[in-house]
Amino acid sequence: MTGSSQEVVTTFEEGYINDLFERLKTQLIDEHPDGLMPRDAHPKMHGLVRAEFTVHDNLPPHYRIGIFAMPATYTAWVRFSNANSAAQPDAKRDIRGMAIKLEGVPGDKLSDEPDCAQNQDFLLISTDTFLCDNVQTFDGMVRAIQGSLWDKLRFFACNPGVVWRLICAFKVFANPLAIRYFSSTPYLLGDHPVKYCATPVAANTQAVPAHPGDNFLREAMVAQLAKQPAEFVFGIQRQSDPRSMPVENAAKRWDEAASPFEAVATLRILAQEFDTSERNRQGEDMRFSPWHCLPVHRPLGSINRARRVVYHGISQLRRRVNGVSL
């Protein structure tokens, strides 16, 4: 166990993480031998947009840590995306993503990548739990998906919880700006485990088009941000019970009745024109990681420890193949 973080690193974890990375890397190389290499997850981008992240005043002392220590407004980039490794039509059921990159954040970061020195990232998805409890199960799922039909049947028969979470998480949405997003995995806030969420301020009154185009989620964002901004309340959920809110089981939902999310900041997506070739290429090249952060916001759990290796390795591979400076 690692101090107050409650982390437990197993003897075999490194092997699962390395196997996961090698499988995802090999899959990307095999599927994209020529041309631009996309992300292994969240490759389809609905838009990279400019935003402001404003930390609220008069927060309780236990929230005034790191980014939230003082009231301030940070400029930010926000990338909205589909999770599936294939760039499929938006009408397909899927998990959606919101990746936030704050700029001008002083202090040493856990990542030593030069282009991340002044950034703090938050990675959120449209479901409040991760599909798998730990990296061993996640590596097993990827191995099964890449394997034979029998491999798939065997894995999902032995892991019904993963099947149920897939069913619950994969949905069709009308507009990325009207979705509630969650970190799904825990993080430190000082020395206390927490989770994050972003909740849209405006009520969702949109419906999925009767005959949706392949990119109707981007089109919904374009139409809305041409007229007005969009706002999210950024909230923090503090762990109230280590047994019912574990840091090493990313598939375990933290009960909001026991510990509600409390508003600490406002994320304001500015009104703008973003659907340009230059902005789209910028969104393709920009990298996000939960490890682009201040030490007081350190990611927790085996899924996040795997992300440190996988995100960095895949990013380096993509930049090399795509001719982006490392």
Image (spheres, rainbow, N blue to C red):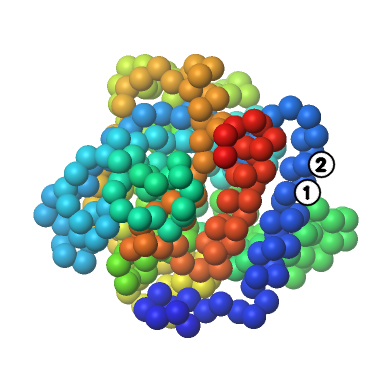
Q: Is residue 192 above or below residue 163?
A: below
User: Is residue 220 at least partly visible in the picture?
Assistant: no
Near mark 1 (Cα within 10 A), the count class, few <14, some 14-19 or many ≥20, is few
Q: Residue at x 73, y 49 (%)?
A: 25
Q: Position of residue 70 (x, y in %)?
A: 17, 52
Q: Which residue is mark 2?
A: 30
Task: Please give the label number shown on residue 26.
Answer: 1
- Mark 2 secondary-structure assignment: helix
Q: Nearer the viewer, residue 149 or 138?
A: 138
As drawn, 3 above or below 264: below
The residue at 34%/36% (across/down) is 76
- Does 276 appear above or below 118? above
Judge by depth and name the residue closer to the eye, 92 or 299.
299
Residue 119 place in picture, x, y as percent:
38, 45
Q: Quadrant of residue 237?
A: bottom left
What is the crowding at mark 2: few (fewer than 14 residues within 10 Å), some, or many (at least 20)? few
Q: Examine the image and state in which quarter residue 131 appears.
A: bottom right
- x 56%, y 77%: residue: 9
Q: Amino acid at mark 2?
A: Asp
Q: Is residue 48 visible?
A: yes
Circles 2 and 1: CB atoms closer than 8 Å: yes
Amino acid on which the number 1 mark rests in the picture: Thr
Residue located at (74% from left, 56% from top): 22
- Residue 63, horizontal then vertical, whole percent: 23, 61
Q: Secondary structure at mark 1?
A: helix
Image quadrant in which the C terminus is located: top right
